[in-house]
C-alpha cells in the first residue's frame, strides 16, 4: 500500500506558517460492500492547517467526496483515523460526533439542500435552531451573514424564488452560522454556470482571507486551483499528488 504525504518542502512551509493541523487523516481506508468490496479510499494521509484554503481535486469516483464526508464526521472509515484539533473521531460516540459537527463544522452541498418551505433567513438560522443561542443573536447574526453574501434584500424569499447562485450563497451563509472552525464544501459550483461559479469562488476566497476561515473544497474543475493554497490530487481512492495552488504563484 502506498501512502502519499506532503512533500518535505511543502510540509516544512506549512509547519512554519501553521503550528499544528486543525484536521488530519491517517491511513484512511473506506470499503463499501456492494456485492463485492469496493475500495473508495485506500491509505490516505493528509493534514489541513488553520486558515488554509485547500482544494481536493480528481475525476468522478476518485474518492474525493468520500474523504470529505469522513473529515466531516458524516461517515466512519473502515480503517485509519480522522482527527480534529488532535481529537480522534473514533474515540467519540455518535452523539459526541454529532455535537462536534454542529459546533465546529460547516458544510456546503452541491445541491444546496435548502428547506423549500423556509425563507432564506430561516434556512441560514437552521444550524442554531437547537442551540441555546438567544433568539435576538440568531436573528442578528443571520441577517448579518445574508448581508455579507449580498442577499439582505432576499431574506424573506423562498428557495424556489432564488437563482442557483443565490441559493448557494444562502447555503454558504447557513454553513457559517455556527461560526465553524472548519468549512467543508462538496462541489459547491458543480451546478452553476461559469460566471456564477466565479462569483461563488470569489466569495469563498474572501471568507477565507478576511475571516481566516479554514476551508476544504472538493471539485473536478482544475480552473479553480487558482483560489487554493494547496491542491490535493485524488485518483482511484488514493492521494497521488499535492501541488501549490494559485495563491502562491
Image (spheres, grey):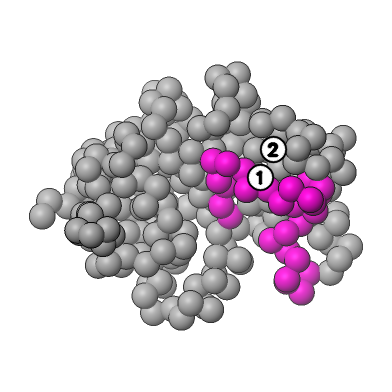
Residue 30 seen in this snapshot: no
* Residue positioned 75% across, 41% down in the render: 159
Give the residues drawn in magenta, as a range.
Answer: 106-133
Asked whether the beta carbons under mark 1 and mark 2 sit within 8 Å of each other, the answer is: yes
Report if residue 88 lies within the magenta region: no
SS for tag 1? helix
Report if residue 121 lies within the magenta region: yes
SS for tag 2? helix
**Hey, which quadrant is residue 206 in on the image?**
top right
From the top left corner, tell me how far across and down residue 19 is, in percent. 40, 57
In-front residue for pair 185/190: 190
**Hey, which quadrant is residue 102 in on the image?**
bottom right
| Mark 2, residue position | 167
Position of residue 18 in the picture relative to residue 142 (left or right): left
In the picture shown, does residue 128 fall above or below 6? below
Position of residue 75 in the picture relative to residue 157 (left or right): left
Q: Quadrant of the N terminus?
A: bottom left
Amino acid at each position: 500500500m502506498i501512502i502519499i504525504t506532503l512533500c518535505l518542502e511543502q510540509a516544512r512551509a506549512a509547519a512554519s506558517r501553521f503550528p499544528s493541523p486543525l484536521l488530519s487523516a491517517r491511513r484512511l481506508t473506506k470499503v463499501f460492500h456492494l456485492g463485492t468490496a469496493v475500495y473508495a479510499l485506500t491509505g490516505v494521509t493528509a493534514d489541513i492547517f488553520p486558515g488554509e484554503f485547500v482544494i481536493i481535486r480528481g475525476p468522478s469516483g476518485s474518492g474525493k467526496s468520500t474523504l470529505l464526508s469522513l473529515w466531516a464526521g458524516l461517515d466512519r472509515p473502515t480503517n485509519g483515523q480522522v482527527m480534529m484539533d488532535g481529537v480522534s473521531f473514533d474515540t467519540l460516540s455518535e452523539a459526541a460526533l454529532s455535537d462536534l459537527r454542529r459546533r465546529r463544522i460547516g458544510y456546503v452541498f452541491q445541491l444546496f439542500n435548502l428547506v423549500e418551505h423556509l425563507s432564506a433567513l430561516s434556512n441560514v438560522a437552521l444550524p442554531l435552531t437547537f442551540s441555546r443561542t438567544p433568539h435576538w443573536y440568531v436573528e442578528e447574526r443571520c441577517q448579518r451573514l445574508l448581508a455579507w453574501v449580498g442577499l439582505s434584500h432576499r431574506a424573506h424569499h423562498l428557495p424556489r424564488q432564488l437563482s442557483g447562485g443565490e441559493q448557494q450563497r444562502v447555503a454558504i451563509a447557513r454553513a457559517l452560522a455556527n461560526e465553524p472552525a472548519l468549512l467543508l464544501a462538496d462541489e459547491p459550483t458543480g451546478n452553476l454556470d461559469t460566471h456564477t461559479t466565479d462569483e461563488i469562488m470569489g466569495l469563498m476566497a474572501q471568507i477565507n482571507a478576511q475571516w481566516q476561515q479554514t476551508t476544504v473544497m472538493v471539485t473536478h474543475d482544475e480552473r479553480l486551483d487558482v483560489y487554493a493554497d494547496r491542491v490535493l490530487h485524488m485518483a482511484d481512492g488514493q492521494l497521488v499528488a499535492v501541488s501549490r495552488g494559485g495563491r502562491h504563484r
